[in-house]
Amino acid sequence: MVSYSLLKNTFLFSFILIGACGNSISSQNPKIESHKEEKQDNGKITAKDLFVADIKTGAENHTTYLPILKDKKVGIVTNQTGTMTINGNPTHIVDFLVGQKVNLKAIYAPEHGFRGTADAGEHVKDGKDTQTGLPIVSLYGNNKKPKPEQLQGIDIMLFDLQDVGARFYTYISSLHYVMEACAENNIQVIVLDRPNPNGSIVDGPVLEKENTSFVGMHPIPVLHGMTIGEYAKMINGEKWLKDGIQCRLTIIPCLNYNRDMEYHLPVKPSPNLPNDQAINLYPSLCFFEGTNISVGRGTNKQFQIYGSPYLPKKGFNFTPVPNEGAKDPLYNGKTCYGEDLSTIKNVNQLELKWLIDAYKHTEDKSKFFIPFFTKLAGTKKLQEQIEAGKSETEIRESWKKGLADFKQTRKKYLIYAG
């Protein structure tokens, strides 16, 4: 039986990983061990299982990074997910830094903008934050990578975005371009780490190089099972930046965190991921974005339902209408028939059954897939397998070697146990 004092000491042990040109400096890269009373039905460790303080994000681990920022000119890549709790009160990382007299020079905003309200793929303009007066530089559209003039005068770039653990979620693509631009301009990057709400799930086809795009930049599976800090280490260590350059990288870790823990996001990571259920189903249902099937954009159950006018006209149906994050949703005003997944149990793998079933029952199979599907899948093979009538078991078998190789590489960059 592990003693309470040992549990306390294990969880309260904090550490910092400082990477320079791909190297990490830490106290032998310690892992935070998981200690719990018992596993829940879904295998996740919940907060009530712990004997110690709640999870603290990298942003909340401020005693570690504030000294590094002293007397430096700082930029920050963040949006509405850059939230933190200080003395029991929620605050935004930008407001916290301003209050700490950090010399913030600019905010850099990814897809969906600084406040996180823009549609997926919508052009986000540069602007000014009304709260602080700081300039906002958009890192989406034609300016995904900061230009040298947009980085002028910056000593350190903070990165604080909440990822959801899926390859096609573009915040990790923004991470790549920020790291690359900072490496080229000799600017240190500090990633304030946050838990991955899809935990340790590693699944799906590995992206093939010829299918690289902003929704898939690296040879990883759909679900990578890493925090954004761990992922930054992988980008640097595997030399995925242009010409193999590496940036001066520092990871500010979460405290009291194990990747098997259940983690609920305090705010929506983007307009169409409104709750835990949507975040859990997103990696599986996002494949529909490369087909003629709606994933519920224009409803209040985004990424929890799917359907189209071309599926059997019976059972569950919905009608998309414009709303936040979907100004002109697919099938605007048309009745869609499909399935409601909003109350099913959490999935712990990449599910293909809904995609395969929709393909089998659509009216015209020749109109089901669109070219974007290959970018999402990262391979042409998945569409070919589905069109050939392969079973989910057969398809999953074809992923095994790629997943095994990725997991072996991934081990080098993990910070947390689980």
Image: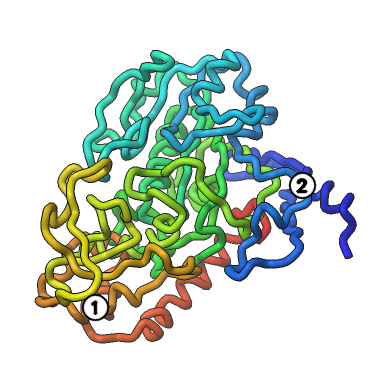
Q: To which residue does mark 1 refer?
A: 384
Question: Please, what is the three-letter code of the amino acid marked with disc 1?
Answer: Glu
| Residue 213 image offset from top left, x and y in percent | 29, 53
Q: Nearer the viewer, residue 37 or 315?
A: 315
Q: Residue at x 13, y 67 (%)?
A: 309
- 158 lies left or right of 207: right
Residue drawn at (51%, 30%) of the image: 158
**Which residue is found at the position 39% from the left and 72% from the top?**
351
Q: In this view, does 6 lie to the left or right of 21?
A: right
Mark 2 or mark 1: which is in front? 2
Name the residue that disc number 2 marks.
52
**Residue 364 found in image quarter:** bottom left
Total numbered badges shown on the rendered structure: 2
Q: Which kind of residue does numbered mark 2 sit on?
A: Val
Q: Where is residue 238 in the image (x, y as percent from the top left)?
A: 50, 53
Callout 2–callout 1 Cβ contact below 8 Å = no
- Res. 228 in view: yes
